[in-house]
Image (spheres, grey):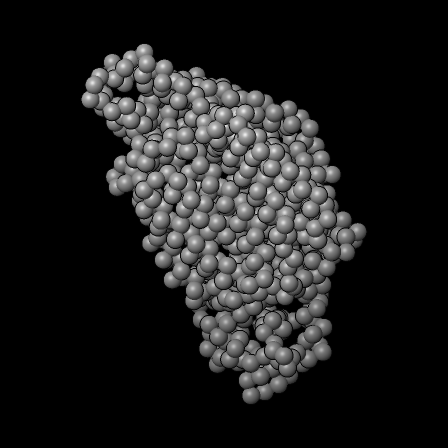
Amino acid sequence: MTETAAADQREAPAGVSKARANAVFVAVMLGMLLAALDQTIVSTALPTIVGDLGGAGHLSWVVTAYLLAETISTALVGKFGDLFGRKQMFLTSVLIFTIGSFFCGFANSMTWLILWRGVQGLGGGGLMVTASALIADVIPLRDRGKYQGALGSVFGVVTVIGPLLGGLFVDHLSWRWAFYVNIPVAVIVLAVAVPAIPAVRSAVRPVIDYLGILLIALGASGLTLVTSWGGTTYPWGSPTIIWLAVGSVVALTLFVFVELRAVEPVLPMLLFRNPVFTVAGLMSFIVGFAMLGGITYLPTYMQYVQGTSATVSGLRMLPMVFGILLASIFSGTAVSRTGRYRIYPMLGAAAMTVGFYLLSMLDETTGLLLSSLYMFVLGVGVGLGMQVLVIAVQNTCDYADLGVATSGVTFLRTLGSSFGVAVFGTVYANKLTTNLAEALAANPLPPGVDPRVAQSPQALHTLPGALSAPLVHAYAETLHVVFLAVIPVALIALVLSFFLKEVPLRDTARAAASDMGDGFAMPASPDSDQELEQAIGALMRRERATVTTEVLTRSSSELDEAAAWCVVRVHLSRDRRGGAELTDIAEQVQVPAAVLAPAFTQAVDAGYLTGGDGRVELTPTGEREFHKLAEAWQGWLTEKLSDWRPGEQAELTEALRRVAGRLVGDQAGDRVPAHSR
């Protein structure tokens, strides 16, 4: 066997071949693509959707329904994955998402579109929250950082190019294809995932905080409805709005009391005793508020005011996209090198404030260069804030809170996104109704021209200039007020940034700082082991060149490469009787058993293994040498994570022991031994 072929035989944990692990990664990546894309793909299609279905006052709910459902789903599906199996929940999420996409495309009213967008969000949240768990099931920990980085990059890039793709579908096919396109991709995901993903279920039965999830869902949905319906569908002083607001506040108050007593709360209230989590969580809420709000309504300005096509509006948003990407990558790299992070949320909040002020100056006469500059400034502000906030939280919490603290920040960010779009939508709908009425009163349309022409950007710009100008100005004035309304929120983020405490970065936080997945706040797992393994994966990717040699030297093991490989494979593959079949090991690494037989024979002769007729077991000497390797890995991890105080945290020490056992399999079991080639 050649060196290249041997290198390709690196396999994933627990008997999952490298080829199968890569197939799982492809399925997960495509699932992530579906879920992330549908957060933003409709933004450039919204003006056309409103022109087709009507209901400009409900425009924001096409985005908000998805985000709220996604938030609820992420809180549930992770637990359900432990309860029923992650493969089952991933496949179920794909099916739910596909059904939602199909009926979104067939919607003939805004109400039905919003309803099926909610169904889409349930599936999308499930897809995203199971992604990291599935990667953890099949990818060796040593390679986890590389795969997680790739997955995060997909999430980040797709999140921000969604508007461009939405515009292309609108102009060249139909807005309905922004949803139909998910169906063939979902079929591919199912075709790859069904045979590839192993059935893995948690050995521990999870405790699910159903009441907490219900209360946060009711409270968040109710407040979003208040901000969306107030002053548009119902007067602000109407009984509907008043009781909806009161009920939402009661639900959120009860949520706090429930979380204080829950065994495994969705959002532990104790986290708010950590000032870094409190500030970072609130700022993350505001960053989500700003990002999705801006992305959702900028295409509206471009299509209604500037008269661009949907595709061109997506292209003209690229300055904001580049601002987010460049600022996120820059801040992550700088934090990784310097270990200092506090300045970046400050600069980000300031840039966001300036960016929204500049956007409020957009009108019918603003040129392309100037509007691009304004959007770039906003993108830089959002990018500087996103990357650092998750890192700051991971850097200050104890191991026991690592998972819930990380997922809590992303949870608050998603809530912020849904509120942001809803608030933007309320201001937009209120002001637009008034401005259009005044424009039509002052400049009536001639007989025979349907007033509903103002709802469609394409139809609006087919009118003669004298007729369209007042209506276009009404849209410009509306969006001016919308962007001004967000400036106080951005200023709150700026004030909060001064209270963000700077704590020296742990090695794991420093190593993970440049991962784009954290920058875009990809939904995190509330499982602390998964978050710890992800952080260690990033650390190992940074120190890959020296870690294996260092650990082998530390172990003082008598095993050579071939014997170590055989000992580790037997340890990982042994059955209830304590041994392993050579044919099973050969099937796992996709090499004929005859090729492996000489190495195992030598290990038997050396006294590390015992057995015959294709079945082997570890001898006491073999067990001792295996544990030398495991102890060496645990020693390396403890040394690298000394700033986590592992000696003071029994749970972290136990977690490091488990991780060390997996790493020894990754290290010594990563390739077919040289003696067998």
Q: Residue furthest bottom?
A: 613
Name the one closer to the observer, 57 or 33: 57
Q: Residue at x 25, y 13 (%)?
A: 466
Vertical position of residue 405 compared to residue 18: above or below: above
Q: Residue furthest right?
A: 648
Res 465 → quadrant? top left
Viewport quadrant of the N terminus:
bottom left
Residue 55 screen position, x and y as percent:
37, 32
Vertical position of residue 10 compared to residue 257: above or below: below
Q: Is residue 515 visible?
A: no
Vertical position of residue 274 compared to residue 230: above or below: below
Residue 467 screen position, x and y as percent:
25, 16
Q: Is residue 119 visible?
A: yes
Q: Residue furthest front?
A: 239
Residue 182 screen position, x and y as percent:
36, 50
Q: Residue furthest top?
A: 442
How many marks do you count on the picture?
A: 0
Name the one closer to the observer, 581 or 675: 581
Q: Residue at x 54, y 39 (%)?
A: 221
Res 558 → quadrant? bottom right
Residue 532 screen position, x and y as percent:
64, 52
Q: Is residue 280 left or right of residue 233?
A: right
Q: Is residue 420 left or right of residue 111?
A: right
Q: Residue at x 51, y 35 (%)?
A: 225
Q: Is residue 300 left or right of residue 392?
A: left
Q: Residue at x 44, y 23 (%)?
A: 430
